[in-house]
Amino acid sequence: MKVLKFGGSSVADAARIKVVTGIIADAARGDRVAVVLSAMKGVTDGLISLARKAEEGSEGLKDALEAIRAQHFDAVRLLFGPADQASALTPLAIMCNELEEILHGVELIRECSARTMDLVMSFGERLSCRLAVSYMSAKGIPAVLVDAREIVRTDERFGSASVDFPTSYALIRERLEAVTGIAVIPGFIGATAKGVTTTLGRNGSDYTASIIGAGVDAKMIEIWTDVDGVLSADPRIVPDAFVIPAISSEEAMELSYFGAKVIHPYTMVPAVEKNIPILIKNSLNPAAPGTLIAAAETIKRDGALPITGIASIEGISLVNIEGGGMMGIPGFAARIFAALAREGINIIMISQASSEHTICLVFRTAEGERALATLNRELAPELHTHRIERFELMRELLIVSVIGENMHGTPGMAGRLFSALGRAGINILVIAQGSSERNISFVIEEKNHALALRTIHAEFLPGRSK
Ligand code: ADP
Ligand code: ASP
Ligand code: MG
């Protein structure tokens, strides 16, 4: 079996849905196929904003809901002839009405919990899948809607739930074996053991595809998106970025973890476990070969390229904790980490100077204020006795990561990287290098974003055309 996943841009409107249906029909001629779909482009953002509007009792709620309804209904009108429109519209209309009632509930109590937000967000993928199944059926393709909430079992961490793999795999295998046609499964969503709707984190449909693929021991997981594959850098920032024909799972994980949005970082985990290759393809350009993500030893790479790719995460803040009082005290770092973990705050990067005089912690800005408050509370005794100095949050920063298997054991990489940035006048605030030597990450000011990425690309990957 092959699993094909199509992202929001691939199902953005009627024309794109037609193209995707053609790709699915082609694939189904050679293999058994299961399909995972995202919400139509912009719908998840739209749903989040609806929930916020309902919470605030905002005037704009009705119009915003109408826009989401219209996006789906317009697609139906363009995809179906007059005779079939009513039967395609009815299930979508019922779901939109249900959504409206939930939002009305939020409006009444003026609160949208993480649990309710997951339910609201789930409508995006459920609507797009319902629409696609109706269209595929009308075209004579035997499509069957399989609700991800019946087969992807998670815990109750709403917003980014953790998957219970053994249970999910058993449910997936059992359910999909019973499907005779093409299973169409909403990405991004799952459910707890009690059947409460959860989501897997933004961009999570890629992850769903991989979970489904691992559940059925698929021979291939194809992620269809709107670019020709994994590129050496974000093409919106680095115009010279080029497609990487093949990349190891570890490199793909590092690139996506450090901001390459083309694939969700967890996607590689189930695929690696079951040794399933992932192919990134462009639904706007199916003839392009795409990027193969597979085990490092099977990858044929261009040995001449010193790095594989560059990624970046915006919206970063950091705290620098300094003071002689930390020197040689065992457990100081452990206390900091435990306090932050208790608050559920994620540390993205850490660096400690060997003198133990400073520890630098890097957070997403959204969690920065809470991190600062937590650290101030935890370290109040040391601050009071001046064993450590007062610290502040530095904002508007960016993490840049330079990634590549070839960096391993290549002397002088870091020197070349930081010299190039120095020549461009870019100041580096923190550096961390993974012991795998597959990744060098550093923090700079956000204003240097494009300059830094273009400088590094030109230094290590010059003269390549798309
Ligand atoms: P989908 O809706 O198909 O899931 P996404 O918008 O989530 O698509 O991801 C694809 C986008 O990721 C591309 O359009 C591109 O702008 C962006 N992107 C960022 N970094 C990279 C990269 N290194 N390679 C390819 N695309 C990237
Ligand atoms: N629709 C979800 C999102 O926008 C999941 C996905 O597209 O992968 O985050
Ligand atoms: Mg995506």
Image (cartoon, rainbow, N blue to C red):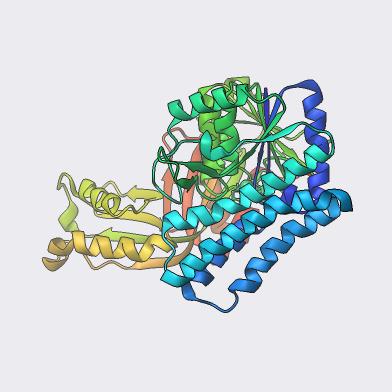
Residue at 58% in and 58% down: 98
279 versus 45 height, above or below: above
Q: Nearer the viewer, residue 121 or 456?
A: 121
Residue at 55% in and 55% down: 121
Measured as percent of width and height from the top left, residue 21 is found at: 80, 39
Q: Nearer the viewer, residue 218 or 258?
A: 218
Compared across the picture, whether 198 is left or right of 28 comes to: left
Measured as percent of width and height from the top left, residue 407 is found at: 54, 34
Count of marks, rendered view: 0
Measured as percent of width and height from the top left, residue 294 is found at: 61, 26
Q: Residue most toward the bottom?
A: 59
Asked whether the viewer can see residue 213, the reply is yes
Quarter of image, res 73: bottom right
Position of the N terminus, as image quadrant, is top right
85 versus 223 height, above or below: below
Residue at 58% in and 30% down: 212
Compared across the picture, whether 11 is left or right of 428 comes to: right
Measured as percent of width and height from the top left, residue 11 is found at: 73, 48
41 versus 34 height, above or below: below
Position of the C terminus, as image quadrant, is top right
Asked whether the viewer can see residue 227, the reply is no
Compared across the picture, whether 124 is left or right of 20 comes to: left
Residue at 45% in and 32% down: 436
